[in-house]
Image (cartoon, rainbow, N blue to C red):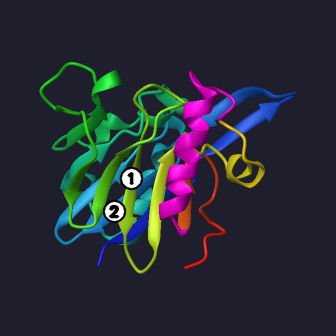
Amino acid sequence: MNTLDVLAVGRLVKEDGIILEAHSTSTLIRSGNVNIVVDTSSTEMLPAIKTSFRQVGVLPKDVSIVVLTHTHHDHCGNNDLFKKAKFYVHTEECPEGRNYVPVSEDVEIAPGVRLVYTPGHTEGSMSVFVDSERNYAITGDAIPLEDNYRRGVPPGINYDPGLAMKSIKYITEYADVMIPGHGFPFMGDKRR
Ligand SMILES: [Zn+2]
């Protein structure tokens, strides 16, 4: 059974619709012996992330895979914490470097843990679908806030709003629970 722990709950601080601060959610997936982190958040969240690792009894050095849902700085600020990890990033925005694994198509990286292409916020945005006692989707900024899901509106920052809405729909068809790029996890309205 795959387990998920939110290491840090991301937030967006806005004033008059302008983003003043952005810190992404960071999530740990444990799949058998494989520890996977999705997004590393911003440097301000490092103390919270370290505390969470201690609480769940996992060391950052035991994380072998980091998935970056996309490469905005508020999702990759603590990459240095994961010295032994391979970084999975979509080919549209994958940096050069031997630690990076470009992802060109949807792929299962551990049993029941899939990287799924969900573009719209950026050209290379991915989500992570995790089969567990429920279906979890770690969405990055494909769904930055629960509000985007509830109101059915694309991320405020996007390169293609139509594609972004398609991605939201695709995610909600799979997921019972969504872990958004910023904010607390929430249940979707899907009936099974
Ligand atoms: Zn972003």
Q: Secondary structure at mark 2?
A: strand
**Residue sitting at x 47%, y 63%:** 174
Q: Please tell me whether residue 84 is drawn above or below residue 100 in the rendered image.
A: below
| Magenta segment includes 98 | no
Rendered position, 98 above or below 68 = above
Foreground pick, 30 / 178: 178
Instruction: Identify the residue at image location x=12%, y=27%.
Output: 98
Q: Quadrant of the N terminus?
A: bottom left
Q: How many discs appear?
A: 2
Tell me the residue that label 2 is attached to: 29
Check disc 1: other Cα within 10 Å, few if <14, some if 14-19, many if 20+: many
| Residue 111, horizontal then vertical, whole percent | 21, 66
- The secondary structure type at the circle numbered 1 is strand
**Quadrant assignment for ligand 1:** top right
Residue 80 percent across, percent down from the top left: 29, 35
Residue 128, numbered label:
1
